[in-house]
Amino acid sequence: MDDAALAAHLAATAGRLLLALQDDGLIADKALGAAGDAVAHEYLVRALAAQRPDDGLLSEEGAEDPARLGKSRVWIVDPLDGTREYSERRTDWAVHVALCVDGAPAAGAVALPGLGLTLSSHAPTAPPPPRNGPPRMLVSRTRPAPQAVQVAEALGAELVPMGSAGAKAMAVLRGEADIYLHAGGQYEWDSCAPAAVARAHGLHVSRIDGSPCLYNNPDPYMPDLLVCRPELAGPALDAVRRLEAVGA
């Protein structure tokens, strides 16, 4: 099984485990999110150790392993992205599984179990055709980043609130929105799988200064991300630069 197919298989399987935990009905509220994090993390760690024993691993829920820094191939996973949404039994949560090679997102999958979908870098397709009307820009449903809101205003974009980072990035891929710009603080596990999938399918992926997203750093903090339709990358990046120039 190649890396992209493995990522898709692992993300989808972890998603089914998370749905089963929800359906059990034995755990509720915040405890459900914590249990989901643990169940999905344990499964992914075991599966990757069996399938790719020589690769490194960085997981949101795992202890830091400095050995990953000396490896070319490192899997970066978020076992449950959107813990709040999962606990509330919404559909905008995800499972992220990605492989970075020499720092670049090389293969990945984002499972959206609540929607019955797994999107991956395997067999990519072109993004949907553009639509008429103002661009639709995704922001956090609970704490929209001020800079993202300002960029949306500069572009005349409609705000689309949504939960997990993976759900938002995949909404662009699925044609439900046009731009996902995040500037409120994230980590590598939040963006690596969405970046790998979005890039494979022809979307623009970068930091909000236009630089590439590079992974497997000693500090996994990666505060910002832009995923958008290719024709909107220039206007979005220009809007960021203009706002920064005036100190907004």
Image: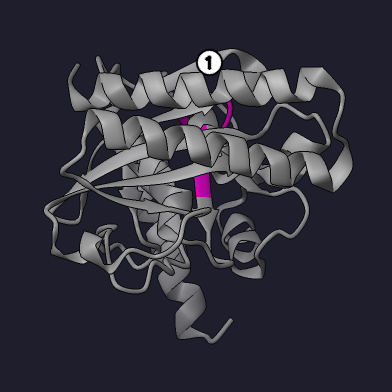
The type of residue carrying mark 1 is Leu
**One can see residue 116 in this view:** yes
**Occupied quadrant, residue 137:** top right
From the viewer's perspective, is 90 left or right of 39?
A: right
The crowd level at tag 1 (other Cα within 10 Å; few <14, some 14-19, many 20+) is: few
Q: Which residue is mark 1?
A: 117
The answer to if 160 sits in the magenta stretch is no
Does residue 174 belong to the magenta stretch? Answer: yes
Quadrant housing residue 148:
bottom right
**Stretch in magenta:** 172-180
Q: Name the quadrant of the C terminus.
A: bottom right
Q: Nearer the viewer, residue 217 or 47?
A: 47
User: How far across and down, in percent of the image, does residue 93 sit?
Assistant: 64, 35
**Residue pictured at 48% horizontal, 51% vertical:** 190
> Which residue shows up at 67% across the image and 68% down it?
146
Does 50 appear above or below 67? above
The image shows residue 141, relative to residue 135, as above or below, that is below
Color encoding of the figure = one colour
Q: Is residue 120 visible?
A: no
Q: Residue furthest bottom?
A: 247
Looking at the picture, how far across and down is residue 83, in whole percent?
69, 44
Is residue 154 or residue 193 the one in the foreground? Answer: 193
SS category of the residue bearing label 1: strand
Coordinates of residue 20 in the picture (x, y in percent):
69, 18
Q: Residue at x 87, y 42 (%)?
A: 29
- x%, y% of residue 215? 28, 58
Horizontally, residue 82 falls left or right of residue 174, namely right
**Looking at the image, which residue is at 36% across and 49% down?**
233
